[in-house]
Amino acid sequence: MHAGERTIEETLREAGLRVTSGRVALMELLHGSHQPVALDDIDLRRHPAVGDRATVFRNLHAFAEAGIVAMLRGMGKRDLYELVHDHRHAHITCTQCGKTACIDGAPPPPGKKVKARGWSNVMPSLSYTGRCDECS
């Protein structure tokens, strides 16, 4: 954690969420991940402090509702979660296996092939999710 950064507990409180040991452990897990995480990627035996599968699911959705975690819907056929960052970046998903990774920097222009280390045939596309006025 760098000088001036909020603690996990402060982040949860400022988002209007109750601080629990499971939520802190889940936030630490997300903070330590260098790519978006799916619910199935979280090894509950290695990280028992995060709680059971249902608790992790509810907490991930609570974090997303509070705006501290981004939920990437349908990336690689499953929902992925990552902490909301201060820097802009895009995501790349393998069309074969569904693996998703972050690409730092502003999203590339649509329709132009992009070079990404360790990837081939990379074509950018921009996807947004949100809620309409009726559902908000």
Image (tube, rainbow, N blue to C red):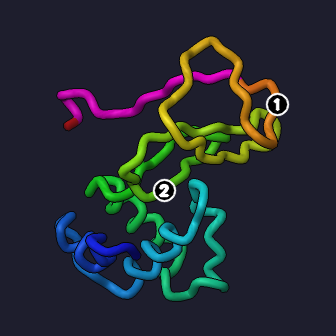
- Label 1 is placed on what type of residue? Ser
Within the magenta stretch, is there residue 128? yes
Q: For the view shown, which residue lies furthest in the front direction?
A: 3
Asked whether, in this view, residue 128 is left or right of residue 103, the answer is left
Which mark is on residue 120?
1
Please report the residue visible at 47 percent of the width from the left and 76 percent of the height from the top: 28
- Label 2 is placed on what type of residue? Glu
Asked whether, in this view, residue 25 is left or right of residue 41, the answer is left
Asked whether, in this view, residue 113 is left or right of residue 110, the answer is right
Dot 2 falls on a residue whose secondary structure is strand
Please report the residue visible at 34 percent of the width from the left and 61 percent of the height from the top: 63
Q: Position of residue 18 (x, y in %)?
A: 23, 77
Tell me the residue that label 2 is attached to.
Answer: 82
Camera-nearest label, 2 or 1: 1
Within the magenta stretch, is there residue 124? yes
Q: Position of residue 25 (x, y in %)?
A: 45, 81
Which image quadrant for residue 93? top right
Range drawn in magenta: 123-135
Q: Residues within 10 Å of mark 2 (few under 14, many from 20)?
A: many
How far apart in space, not on screen, are marks 2 and 1 (Cα)? Answer: 24 Å
Nearer to the camera, 133 or 102 = 102
